[in-house]
Image: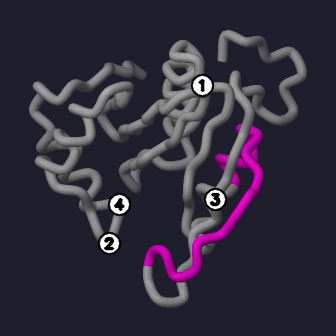
């Protein structure tokens, strides 16, 4: 699987289409482009998924992670998360945050494997009755159960 860095100058139509297939309130191509113009914001993509991460000071935030339905549970999410964590660590981030819908069990499992834990909740963030959990982990990532993982993650 090939992971490529994506810039604001690239054609972002495929990413916007994928985001629309994954989320009820998707980001359009211009919204993605504007995010990627922000300092210390990066996107990494494969043919069936992408991630956007932003670093501010010693913290990083996953802004979005979108994986095509046919590519889920095959390791792409983990690969993209590790790539985003490497980027963030390389720019001085010591912690990483993200928000996830309380109903997204598959994402919860992925993030737990990567060492994320709940630090807060946003009531009705995604929709009435659909809270967001705020998750946090230390960088560099050390996936749970992998005691030999190194700082290269």
* Residue found at x 18% / y 42%: 34
Near mark 2 (Cα within 10 A), the count class, few <14, some 14-19 or many ≥20, is: few
- How far apart are the two marked residues, 2 and 3, measured between alpha carbons? 19 Å
Secondary structure under badge 4?
Answer: helix
What residue is shown with label 1?
Answer: 93
Near mark 1 (Cα within 10 A), the count class, few <14, some 14-19 or many ≥20, is: many
Asked if residue 5 shows in the view, the reply is: yes
Disc 2 or disc 3, which is closer to the eye?
3
State the image coordinates of residue 46 (x, y, percent, origin top left). Answer: 34, 30
- List the single residue furthest toward the front: 57
What residue is shown with label 4?
Answer: 22
Query: Which of marks 4 and 1 precedes in the sequence?
Result: 4
Query: Which of marks 1 and 3 precedes in the sequence?
Result: 1
Near mark 3 (Cα within 10 A), the count class, few <14, some 14-19 or many ≥20, is: some
* Residue found at x 31% / y 21%: 5
- List the single residue furthest toward the bottom: 128
What residue is shown with label 3?
Answer: 134
Query: Which of marks 3 and 2 precedes in the sequence?
Result: 2
State the image coordinates of residue 3 (x, y, percent, origin top left). Answer: 38, 21
From the viewer's perspective, tell me whether residue 122 is left or right of residue 49: right
Comparing 57 with 146, the one in front is 57
Which residue range is magenta in the image? 109-126
116 vs 39: above or below: below
- How far apart are the two marked residues, 2 and 1, measured between alpha carbons? 30 Å
């Amino acid at each position: 699987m090939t992971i490529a860095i994506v810039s604001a100058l690239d054609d972002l139509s495929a990413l916007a289409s994928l985001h629309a297939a994954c989320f009820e309130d998707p980001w359009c191509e211009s919204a993605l482009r504007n995010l990627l113009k922000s300092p210390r914001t990066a996107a990494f993509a494969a043919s069936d998924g992408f991630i956007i991460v932003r670093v501010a000071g010693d913290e990083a935030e996953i802004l979005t992670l979108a994986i095509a339905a046919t590519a889920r549970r095959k390791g792409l999410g983990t690969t993209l998360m590790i790539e985003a964590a490497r980027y963030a660590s390389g720019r001085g981030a010591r912690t990483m945050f993200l928000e996830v819908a309380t109903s997204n069990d598959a994402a919860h499992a992925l993030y737990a494997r990567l060492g994320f834990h709940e630090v807060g909740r946003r009531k009705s963030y995604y929709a009435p009755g659909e809270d967001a959990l705020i998750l946090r982990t230390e960088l560099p990532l050390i996936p749970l159960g992998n005691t030999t993982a190194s700082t290269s993650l």
